[in-house]
Image: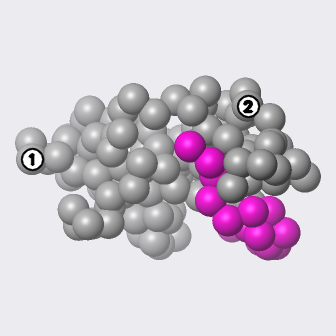
Amino acid sequence: MTAPDPAQCRRTSGAASTTRRCSASFFLLSRVGRDWDEVYSEAVSRLDRPDPIFWMVARAEDAKKPFVLMGESSYCSGLFVDADKRLAIVDPNLRVEHMKPGCACCTHTFNGVAFIQKYDPDDG
């Protein structure tokens, strides 16, 4: 699975914004399988606004994605709330080994782990 849009690598973002996204993503990933109302309540209390939560957690069925871009080259598992109101991973079988970088200029990560595969300009 190739990371989308290599142009994302050249996009700039503020350090505070990236830190907020990463903190929220690792917090949410650590709460997979737990009651959504409790997770949401705790997540909101840690943030100045709830937006970063929904960068990862799909609000509707058609918004579910196997992975989401959280920074210039940082990807995380996409999340959703299941029928039992528990936080769940959209594609629990997706691993860093499946991810292919979209460029050679960045260090790409998936859930905080560097991509294993190297950039191949012929994958496109």
User: Is 7 placed left or right of 90 in the picture?
Assistant: right
Instruction: Identify the secondary structure beneath mark 2.
Output: loop
User: Is 36 placed left or right of 113 in the picture?
Assistant: left
The N terminus: image quadrant:
top right
Magenta segment: does it hold 103?
no
Residue range (magenta): 1-17
- Label 2 vs label 1, nearer the camera: 2
Q: Position of residue 59 (x, y in %)?
A: 27, 66
The C terminus: image quadrant:
bottom right
Q: Position of residue 9 (x, y in %)?
A: 80, 63
The amino acid type, in three-letter code, at marker 2 is Gln
Q: Quadrant of residue 53?
A: bottom left
Q: Which residue is mark 2?
A: 117
User: Is 99 placed left or right of 34 in the picture?
Assistant: right
Q: Quadrant of residue 88?
A: top left
Of callouts 2 and 1, the N-terminal one = 1
